Image: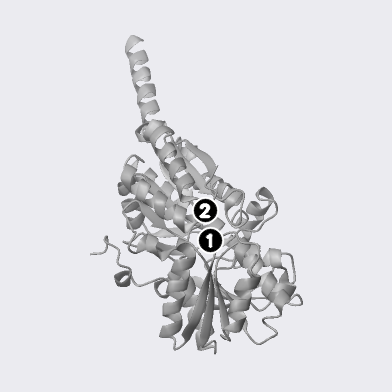
Amino acid sequence: MRTALKSLLAVTVAGLFAAAPASAQFTNNVIKLGVLSDMSSLYTDLAGAGSVVATKMAIADSGIEKRGIKVEVVEADHQNKPDVGSAIARRWFDAEGVDAIVDVPNSGVALAVSAIAKEKNKVLLASGPGSSDLTGKACNANTVHFTYDTWMLANGTGTAITKAGGSSWFFITANYAFGQALERDTTAAVEKAGGKVLGDVKVPINNQDFSSFLLQAQASKAKVIGLANAGGDTINSIKQASEFGIVKGGQSLAGLLVFITDVHSLGLQTAQGLTFTTTFYWDMNDKTREFSKRFAPQDKGIHPTMVHAGVYAVVLHYLKAVEALKSDADGAKVVAEMKKMPTDDPLFGKGSIREDGRGIHPAYLVKVKTPAESKAPWDYYSVVATIPGDEAFRPLKDGGCSLVK
């Protein structure tokens, strides 16, 4: 009897240890993700609370918690200020046990947080920022840049519009890291396609009045006015350009970064005909529609932007990597594992994380439908062309990333 009891106890104890070896090897016995986003300003609809929703959906869909591994999510507003974002990142990493920071829709903030992630050997999973410098001169072994970047936007939209006859450009540019990188990369794409840039004007972020900047663009006589901005700035500049009658006067607008939330805010009457590049559209296929049907009720009815989709996909991939390693302690090792494993998710399909941290997947050139073409709420895009992943993003050799051998 005593021998049988000892055997039973031995089996029970062994079973307990077998059921939870992975969680015991995670920092503080939990994987902790910090969603750092714009919760209150011009990028809040395209990222913001929706990025928190997408993170939580990725955790649930991964099934990781059913396997005994606890995952926690915290959130904060970086207010589009690098100093605020940096302070939050340091507090999260140093005092609150955060293993990875997610989203960060502001390139200035993201570049600062990326450097801190490297310093602390944690992870940045960037979906919201656009600057291609994150996988170029500012790359590091602790950052993954997943959804889009300024090189992709420039070469998708800038090349297509220039080849279609938009041979001269004038830029209205958000005056911080993202806008500057987008103008730089689009200028290179336009000139490569045989066009020329006649000038630009730099505009403070979160600007309400674009009248003087639009008048400068109008006076340039450029065929294309390139909007190197995003979110509320894109919405305001397009609305005011419409009021000025700029398109009726023969010039065209190129929204270099346009989100479905921008189109929704503008309305199809104003936004119709806009051509731009994206990496995700909710109505692409059954899987994207299913995700969007679950997502929208959790985010005020907003259909997911490519930033939301990118948050979901990159968090899924991060969780696969830490589960495979059975540890989240070494950020650089986690990112190395993410690069080793092919990406495969319902929203972007099969792809990879490149040596420089760049997520590789297809991009799409889309055109906004007319009101008559739209058959349902949020039915806004027609896909004009699919750009394969190996063509959509900057060649590895051209980025200047120190990780590339």
Q: What amino acid is at disc 2? A: Tyr
Q: Earlier in the sequence, mark 2 or mark 1?
A: 2
Residue 367 in view in this figure: no
Left or right of 385 on screen, residue 116: left
Secondary element at tag 2: helix
Kind of residue at disc 1: Leu
Kindly report the distance in space between the C-alpha atoms of the residues bearing marks 2 and 1.
9 Å
Are discs 2 and 1 less than 8 Å apart at CB?
yes
Q: Which residue sits at x=50%, y=37%?
A: 72
Question: What mark, if any, has residue 347 been given in the picture?
Answer: 1
Residue 206 x %, y %: 59, 59
Can residue 213 be seen here? The reply is yes
Q: Is residue 237 above or below residue 312?
A: below
Q: Quadrant of the C terminus?
A: bottom left
Q: Give percent across and percent down for residue 276.
A: 56, 74
Residue under the point 40% across and 26% down: 16
The quadrant in which the N terminus is found is top left
Question: Is residue 311 shown left or right of residue 267?
Answer: left
| Left or right of 75 on screen, residue 137 | left
The residue singled out by tag 2 in the image is 312
Mark 2: give few (<14), some (14-19) or many (20+) Cα within 10 Å: many
Q: Is residue 284 above or below residue 327?
A: below
How many other residues sit within 10 Å of disc 1, few (<14), some (14-19) or many (≥20)? many
Secondary structure category for the residue under label 1: loop
Which mark, by number, is residue 207? none
**Residue located at (41% from left, 35% from top):** 97
Give residue 163's position: percent from left, percent from top.
50, 88
Q: 392 or 273, which is in the foreground? A: 273
